[in-house]
Image (spheres, rainbow, N blue to C red):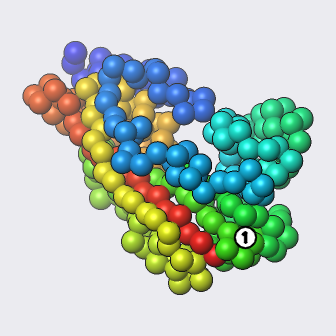
Amino acid sequence: MNANELRTKWLAEEEIAHIKGWDFSHIEGKFYSEENDMPWDYKTVIQKYLKPTDKILDMDTGGGEFLLSLGHPYALTSATEGYAPNVALCRETLTPLGIDLREMSDECNMPFDDNTFDIVLNRHGSYDPKEIYRVLKPGGLFITQQVGEDNDWDLVQLVLPGKEKSFPGHNLEKQSELFTANGFTSLEQGETYKPIRFYDTAALVWFARVIVWEFVDFSVDRCFDQLLAVEKKIREHGFVEGKVHRFYFVMRK
């Protein structure tokens, strides 16, 4: 393909780029990621600490699928969500079960009383250590898995050179220090980096338009020269590679 044909192809991918839940089937076979091959399993970590009598909160629950997979008693379960389409979905799926759903867009102002929960869960959502401390009972636990600051950063630099990180300081060392400085004790933690590869430039275009919080200001027109360089690398080496960055910790109040 010549440059004009590539532009047309990439603009078409940009136009249709969207995602429902966390479904990357549109680019299946065109990229490779070990995102789901972590040294720990978040659900297993939770189950190690979770007791049937615990009152729990799942922050940024999404559609509530992961929360429901825990099988915890609904009357002892609360959830927050801030994205309007997910809030509507949760009102259909969680509320009828008796789960206490709260719409929340400000993690610094959680709509719960002091000392409410035995466990607060947070998978890839934002948080405020002071608020987590406030809503946890004495001895309560905060269990989180997070996307680290270096996630996809090599790929961002390929198409947006010189761009600053979207979430600087979001790594295990800094975040665990933040919690211990606010009165928490660390029970366990871990951090890992895994490869992610793209074998097709159009797939990277789609991905960048979906993960907008990492690829800030990306567009085909704005980044066309960089995309041509990516295309050249893929033709020469078969792929371009970045890394997945994840960390988790369990903190006790």
* x then y, percent, for residue 185: 54, 77
Residue at far left of view: 236
Q: How many marks?
A: 1
Q: Is residue 64 visible?
A: no
- 145 or 42, nearer to the observer: 42
Residue 253 quadrant: bottom right
Judge whether 48 appears above or below 85 on screen: below
* x then y, percent, for residue 101: 83, 48
The answer to whether residue 35 is left or right of residue 47 is: left
The residue sitting at 42% across, 57% down in the picture is: 247
The answer to whether residue 152 is left or right of residue 2 is: right
Q: Is residue 70 visible?
A: yes
| Amino acid type of the residue tagged 1 in the rendering | Leu
Characterize the local packing of mark 1: few (<14), some (14-19) or many (20 or more) Cα atoms within 10 angstroms.
Answer: many
* x then y, percent, for residue 217: 45, 48
Judge whether 95 appears above or below 166 on screen: above
Element marked by disc 1: strand
* x then y, percent, for residue 131: 70, 73
Q: Which residue is mark 1?
A: 136
Residue 106 quadrant: bottom right
The residue sitting at 78% across, 55% down in the picture is: 53
- 174 or 16, nearer to the observer: 174
Q: Quadrant of the N terminus?
A: top left
- 142 or 45, nearer to the observer: 45
The answer to whether residue 120 is left or right of residue 38 is: right
The residue sitting at 66% across, 41% down in the picture is: 70
The residue sitting at 59% across, 49% down in the picture is: 47
